[in-house]
Image: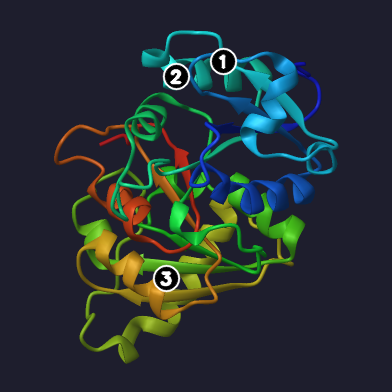
């Protein structure tokens, strides 16, 4: 059954244990946002509707309140069908594991997940299947901010999550993130990075003030700013591992997945221990 009026989060499952790793995260976000989990079976071959619960490993009690669908298209077009269904249902998010085959190494991005990432304009939530079915709470959100207006304007779903959960936003500015960008209106780093005491307090205050204004961050959401220098993807992953209180990483990207592009996003999705929320933004004005 499809309900286009009820806010929903689309969760593709293939019946594997690996795919189930997304359920604690999707369930918590659904509860916070007042949304329904719309579970879609993407296995092959199609099975009778009354067998879907068993195939996906749900008991009737666990399935209470959930909506179940099944893809009927060609297996080679699973990603396309998932994105189409999410668009048809006006899903808030598509939530999925990075891969669902146990023989794949940690850090692998499966073909279906990669194609959904490439084609979806709906926000995506990824999780490494190795986290298993552990409970998940949302108390701290890591938002890497490169200082560009497009990045900040894209964070509304994360801001809304923080508001609903009463979570704190940890803002991370990685210097290299801004050095390679020339988007009009971008906010540059302090001149003397090796002597932060000279400019850091005023710069940090202005940076956060600007982020709050452009991103429409309510005053009740607590924010803290951190700075790092190096390759953005590696620094974001390192920061999240050194700060185990980080529950979710939020990334904005421009939808270009070709080789040599989106290196930061791919590094974080593949190697972060916590879930990653990906928000697509418009290409920058140069």
Question: What residue sits 39% from the left and 33% below the top?
Answer: 117
* Observer-nearest of 241 and 200: 241
Q: Secondary structure at mark 3?
A: helix
List x then y, in percent, for residue 196.
30, 86
List x then y, in percent, for residue 79.
43, 22
- The answer to whether mark 1 and mark 2 are in CB contact below 8 A is yes
- What is the spatial separation of the Cα atoms under label 1 and label 2, in whole angstroms? 8 Å
Question: What residue sits 45% from the left and 26% below the top?
Answer: 120
Q: Label 2: which residue?
A: 78
Question: What residue sits 26% from the left and 43% below the top?
Answer: 262
The answer to whether residue 216 is visible is no
Taking 109 as reference, is 176 above or below it? below
- What is the spatial separation of the Cα atoms under label 2 and label 3, in whole angstroms? 32 Å
Taking 145 as reference, is 199 above or below it? below
Q: Residues within 10 Å of mark 1 (few under 14, many from 20)?
A: some
Q: Label 1: which residue?
A: 71
* Observer-nearest of 46 and 257: 46
Q: Label 3: which residue?
A: 240
Image depth: mark 1 or mark 3 in front: 1
């Amino acid at each position: 059954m499809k309900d286009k009026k009820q806010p929903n989060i689309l969760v593709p499952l293939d019946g594997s244990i690996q795919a189930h790793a997304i359920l604690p995260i999707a369930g918590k976000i659904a509860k916070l946002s007042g949304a329904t989990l719309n579970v879609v079976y993407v296995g092959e071959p199609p099975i009778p509707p009354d067998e879907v619960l068993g195939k996906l490993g749900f008991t009737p009690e666990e399935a209470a309140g959930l909506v179940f669908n099944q893809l009927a298209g060609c297996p080679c077009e699973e990603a396309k069908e998932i994105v189409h269904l999410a668009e048809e249902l006006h899903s808030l998010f598509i939530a999925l594991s990075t891969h669902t085959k146990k023989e794949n190494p940690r850090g692998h991005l499966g073909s279906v997940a990669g194609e959904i990432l490439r084609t979806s304009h709906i926000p995506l939530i990824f999780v490494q299947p190795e986290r298993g079915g552990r409970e998940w709470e949302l108390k701290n959100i890591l938002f890497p901010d490169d200082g560009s207006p497009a990045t900040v304007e894209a964070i509304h779903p994360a801001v809304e999550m923080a508001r609903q959960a009463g979570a704190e936003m940890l803002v991370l500015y990685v210097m290299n993130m801004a050095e390679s960008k020339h988007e009009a209106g971008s906010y540059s780093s302090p001149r003397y990075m090796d002597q932060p005491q000279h400019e850091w307090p005023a710069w940090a205050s202005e940076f956060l003030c600007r982020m709050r204004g452009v991103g429409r961050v309510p005053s009740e959401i607590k924010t803290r700013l951190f700075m790092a220098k190096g390759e953005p993807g590696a620094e974001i992953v390192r920061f999240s591992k050194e700060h185990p209180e980080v529950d979710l990483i939020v990334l904005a990207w421009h939808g270009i997945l070709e080789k040599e592009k989106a290196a930061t996003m791919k590094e974080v999705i593949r190697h972060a221990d916590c879930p990653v929320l990906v928000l697509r933004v418009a290409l920058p004005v140069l």
